[in-house]
Amino acid sequence: MIKVFLSHNPEDLRIYFQKAHAALMKISQVVVNPKSRDLTTEELIEAARGCQIMVCHRTTHGKSAIFDELSDLAVFLRPQVDISDVDVGAASANDILVANSVPAFIPATAEMALALMLDLARDVTASTIDFKAENMPPSHMGRQLNGSTAGIVGYGAIGSYLAGKLVALGMRVLVNDPYVTVDQEEVEQVDLPTLLKESDFVLPLATATKETENLINADTISLMKQDVYFINVSRGNLVDEEALEQAYREKRIAKLAMDVGRGADQRPSPHMAELEGVVATPHLGGLTVQNAEAQAWSAVEQVEAILKGDMPPRAVNPESDNRLKKMWAERGIV
């Protein structure tokens, strides 16, 4: 029977992978994380020896040592879309297939952006904290989304989904993305300086690449309105935190909300979250039952395909299937 290793710590296994775990036990021999915490790379290698398939939670980094040391490993599955921390080159060099998940996070992340926009616009968090402390919150006038201008940097899956929702709320929506053509009639495609100068809410939603590293920096921040509300639910890599913090401290950014940053597990950095008035959430964007189950079940779907002798869906290096073919041959699958 094929052995499948699950890297999830017990809490994550229960929250994210419980049903999928039960399904995998019916079709394979499942080996679980033996610790009550996340494993180090060295511990992971020892625990997963003899396993042909590895299903790794997002807290497990796919370092080269895993692919170099585990001679039986044929497939590395990540039930998540982002595989930026997986050394696909090392996997390919060892003829190990890497596959990721269905992009089920799109509505969840877009709704998180909307939640943070509303929070900033109506001082929800600040007023709640004051009121619970029996301090009457200041009577700050809120900002209506209806009639305001939102600027979305990056018109990918999340950006395009969110744009439609903001249009429905009566917002003027500006988009900047040099690689796509906007296909929503009520959304305006503009250059980046125009977007930054005219937006009341700025949301960076571009893909994190070398090109977009620190896309939001001192120069681009200087183009924004002084009363701008800045919301980041995409990746901390898009933002120069030092420049953002300085602008916020100098009141060149009115309000700031973030679900991501350069902290551990892509969470907001503690020094940014501690700033007075900042709304910071610990990378909750994709944390919905619907998203978690869809991503977990994508791993089950992939293991089922492998057991049938099929290439697993969403393989990112399908040419590196020599170990998989060898495993199939040894077990008479193909």
Image: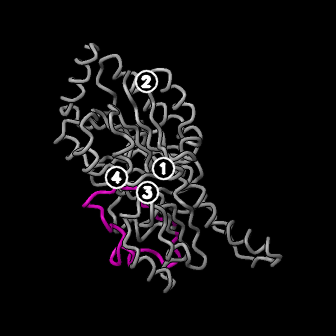
**Around disc 3, counting alpha carbons within 10 Å, would you say few (fewer than 14), some (14 to 19), or many (20 or more)?**
many
First in sequence: mark 3 or mark 4?
4
Please report whichever mark, 1 or 3, sits nearer to the chain's N-terminal start.
1
Q: Measure the C-alpha gap from mark 2 to mark 3.
A: 35 Å
Closer to viewer: mark 3 or mark 4: 4
Say left or right for 283 vs 204.
Answer: right
Percent across and percent down for residue 159 are: 43, 50
Q: Residue furthest bottom?
A: 250
Give the camera-side residue of 34 and 136.
34
At 52% from the left edge and 32% from the top edge, which residue is drawn? 21
Q: The C terminus lies in which quarter of the figure? A: top left
Q: Which residue is mark 2?
A: 28
State whether the magenta stretch is mostly helix, strand or loop: loop
Image marks 4 and 2: residues in contact by CB distance under 8 Å: no
User: Is residue 5 found inside the magenta-colored segment of the image?
Assistant: no
Q: Residue 204: say if magenta.
A: yes
Which residues are drawn in magenta? Answer: 201-229
The residue closer to the viewer here, 249 or 94, is 94
